[in-house]
């Protein structure tokens, strides 16, 4: 699901909750806001999307700078393995022959809180993406 689709999904539930609050005067804003926050948390967009309530109207706020920061790490992967670096190949290139990250690469790795080990830790390789998907492979 793309970020735009997630935003539309949250906007849809905000519209539903606002309609509900106008139709039913005894409905509480806190409960409606909690449902919106639950949806935001379920879609894992709480870093760049926030819901607030003023009187009996719920509004969402998009943090553009946080959204841009999240977009920087799209498509970044981490591979963990106990194989010596000299044995690991990506295509026809050995990992040991790959140069160390340049300045921009180091900044991105630091932002993502990724620490490159001197040697890779386990033989079973876990591939993790930004979306927290993982698959295990044995070499």
Image (tube, grey):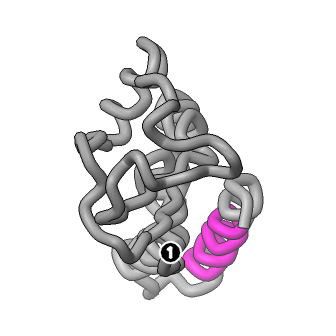
Whether residue 28 is situated above or below residue 131 in the rendered picture: below
Mark 1 burial class by Cα count in 10 Å: few <14, some 14-19, many 20+:
few
Looking at the image, which residue is at 41% across and 46% down?
A: 86
For the N terminus, the quadrant is: bottom right
Q: Is residue 13 magenta?
A: yes
Q: Which residue is mark 1?
A: 139
Query: Helix, strand, or loop for circle 1?
Result: loop
Q: Is residue 100 magenta?
A: no
20 left or right of 9 in image: left
Question: Farthest residue toward the front?
Answer: 87
Whether residue 92 is situated above or below residue 15 in the rendered picture: above
9 left or right of 49 in image: right
Which portion, as a residue range, is magenta? 9-21
Residue 20 position, x and y percent, is 61, 81
Whether residue 101 is situated above or below residue 25 in the rendered picture: above
Quadrant of residue 106 in the image?
top left
Residue 134 position, x and y percent, is 50, 74
Nearer the observer, 122 or 1: 122
Q: Is residue 51 visible?
A: no
Residue 30 position, x and y percent, is 35, 74
User: What secondary structure predominates along the stretch shown in magenta?
Assistant: helix
Looking at the image, which residue is at 59% across and 76% down?
A: 17
């Amino acid at each position: 699901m793309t970020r735009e689709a997630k935003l539309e999904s949250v906007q849809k539930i905000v519209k539903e909750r606002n309609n509900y609050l106008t139709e039913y005067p005894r409905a509480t804003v806190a409960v409606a806001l909690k449902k919106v926050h639950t949806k935001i948390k379920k879609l894992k967009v709480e870093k760049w999307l926030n819901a607030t309530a003023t009187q009996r109207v719920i509004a969402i706020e998009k943090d553009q700078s946080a959204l841009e920061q999240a977009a920087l790490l799209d498509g970044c992967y981490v591979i963990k393995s106990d194989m010596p670096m000299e044995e690991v190949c990506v295509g026809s290139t050995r990992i040991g022959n790959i140069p160390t990250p340049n300045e921009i690469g180091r900044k991105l790795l630091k932002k993502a809180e990724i620490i490159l080990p001197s040697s890779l830790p386990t033989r079973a390789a876990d591939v993790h993406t930004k979306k927290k998907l993982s698959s295990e492979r044995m070499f």
